[in-house]
Image (cartoon, helix red, strand yellow):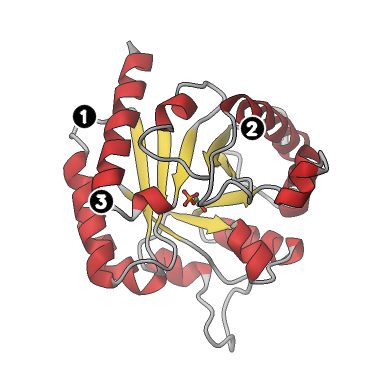
Amino acid sequence: MKTIIANYKMHCTMRESGALARGTLRALPADASNLHVVVCPSFPSLRDVRKIVAKTPIDLGAQNVSSMPNGAMTGEVSAAQLKDAGCAFVLVGHSERRTQLGETDAMIKCKMEQVLHVGMTPVLCVGETKEQHDRGDGAKTVIAQIVAALDGVVVPRSERIVVAYEPAWAIGREAAAVSDVVAMHREIRRAVRNVCGAERDVAVLYGGAVDEKNVQEFLREQEIDGVLVGGASVVLHEFVLLLNAAMATTQTQSV
Ligand code: PGA
């Protein structure tokens, strides 16, 4: 089973998000059991998209969550509110939030706790910047982000720990080399198990310029449990091609 998460970012109106979700649903045959799709519209569209994906195999996710549980926090949206809105997944610590919106490791850890506390699944996003990559500090950076987000956090035994490796330099630009991604995913899996326990079920997704042309290269790898897709998820015909390519890969793998 491979996971595909569509991250609409701040691109879509409610009507556009609904059309994307409807088109995604239409593109998935009822027996697409090797593919798990999660769509993450922005907050105002959650309600409409929920209506479309409710009682379907597509899950609803949010792009962000408050690090606080409730109270006088103008403009924030809590984990409990997202759960109430129908979300099962929440992206936590996306690099755009880390690098452009001042999200710190401490905030990210609190967000992980909030999401887990209400019974949703956090998708912990990690990844190095271009400078860290060029210095050869990619793995060191990513491991430090994992330790900061998970150390001391109680993750229920039954919970699959989902991490998305998204090198900031690849997002919206050019995808990382598959062999480098595979090597990083091994490091990530090891780091998560060091922190959370050797027997933990860990899924590691790749994100960064994934499209219909390269998705198969990534999904073919056993170390890559899925992909997080930004730009190519908000153009319906591109996303449908991507889903078709992904389905073709997972079908080949299951026979
Ligand atoms: P991209 O974005 O597919 O446009 O590179 C991925 C992401 O930031 O989640």
Pick whichever of labels 1 and 2 is earlier in the sequence: 1
Q: In which quarter of the image is residue 176?
A: top right
Q: Disc 3 to disc 1, how far (Cα)? A: 21 Å
Identity, as a three-letter code, of the amino acid under mark 3:
Leu
Q: The residue tagged with tag 1: helix, strand or loop? A: loop
**Residue 128 location in percent, x, y?**
71, 48
- Find residue 205 and report its horizontal and vertical position in percent: 53, 38
Write down the residue under mark 3: 236
Mark carried by residue 200: 2
Place of residue 83 in the rendered image (x, y in percent of width and height, measured from the top left): 43, 64
Q: Can you give x and y, in whole percent of width and height, for residue 27 in the image?
A: 20, 41
In percent of the image, x 75 and y 36: which residue is there? Answer: 191
Q: Is residue 56 visible?
A: no
- Whether residue 249 can be seen here: yes
- Residue visible at 58% across and 46% down? 170
Residue tagged 1: 31
Q: Is mark 2 within 8 Å of ligand 1?
A: no
- Please say if the residues under marks 1 and 2 sit with CB atoms less than 8 Å apart: no
Residue 118's disc is none
**Residue 183 against residue 149 in the figure, above or below:** above
CA separation, marks 2 and 3? Answer: 35 Å
Q: Which sits earlier in the primary sequence, circle 3 or circle 1?
A: 1
Alpha carbon separation for disc pair 1 and 2:
28 Å
Residue nearest the observer in this picture, 63 or 83: 63
Three-letter residue code for mark 2: Arg
**Please, what secondary structure does the residue beneath circle 2 have?**
loop
Asked whether, in this view, residue 205 is left or right of residue 145, the answer is left
9 lies above or below 27: below
